Amino acid sequence: MASRPFWETKALTHMTVREWESLCDGCGLCCLVRFEDEDSGEVVPTRVHCKLFDPDKCTCTDYVNRKRHVPDCIKLTPHNIDALAWMPLSCAYRRINEGRGLADWHPLVSGDPESVHAAGVSVRGQTINEDTLPEPEDAMDYAAWDLMEERGRD
């Protein structure tokens, strides 16, 4: 009888660093520039990515030192996931935290790191670098309301 995978048996707070990091599906959605309305709290994602984001690999080019280069980069932890309502609905951390389990396209389930891209969940090839904009506020010209919806299939 096979044992169940760690994401089905452990709370986020009990995962090892390696387990925690492996939950990232590589979609890139959390690396997009977002704006928050000060009055309503509504968050608007854009198709503009962080200057450290590699849009082809859907990874951070300097993950370990990202806070040094991007001071407002938010480090996701088991202790702040509840407070980050802007996290994508398809995000594995959010799904596990909400008790929904991993989607079938998640690389830990499929065994294929390309499955997140094949399922249409990632932003691979769909974004521009924030450094190409004349002003940071110009990112609003690339507002992407559709990124607030659940992406991929289950």
Image (spheres, rainbow, N blue to C red):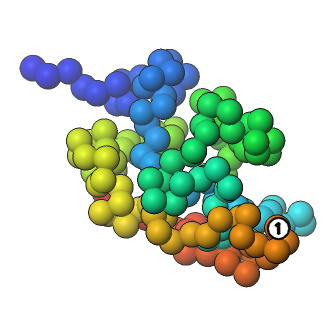
Residue type (three-letter) at the residue carrying disc 1:
Pro
Q: Residue at x 59, y 53 (%)?
A: 53
Q: Residues within 10 Å of mark 1 (few under 14, many from 20)?
A: few
The image quadrant that residue 88 belongs to is bottom right
| Between 135 and 116, the one nearer to me in the picture | 135
Residue 13 visible in the current orientation? yes
Q: Which residue is mark 1?
A: 136
Residue 5: give x, y in percent of width and height: 28, 27
For the C terminus, which image quadrant? bottom left
Residue 149: give x, y in percent of width and height: 52, 68
Query: How many dots with numbers?
Result: 1
Residue 135: give x, y in percent of width and height: 85, 72
Tell me if residue 81 comes above or below residue 140 in the rendering.
above
The image quadrant that residue 147 belongs to is bottom right
Residue 86 visible in the current orientation? no
Q: Residue at x 31, y 39 (%)?
A: 108
Residue 11: give x, y in percent of width and height: 48, 25
Tell me if residue 37 comes above or below residue 144 in the rendering.
above
| Between 131 and 87, the one nearer to me in the picture | 131
Tell me if residue 100 comes above or below residue 122 in the rendering.
above
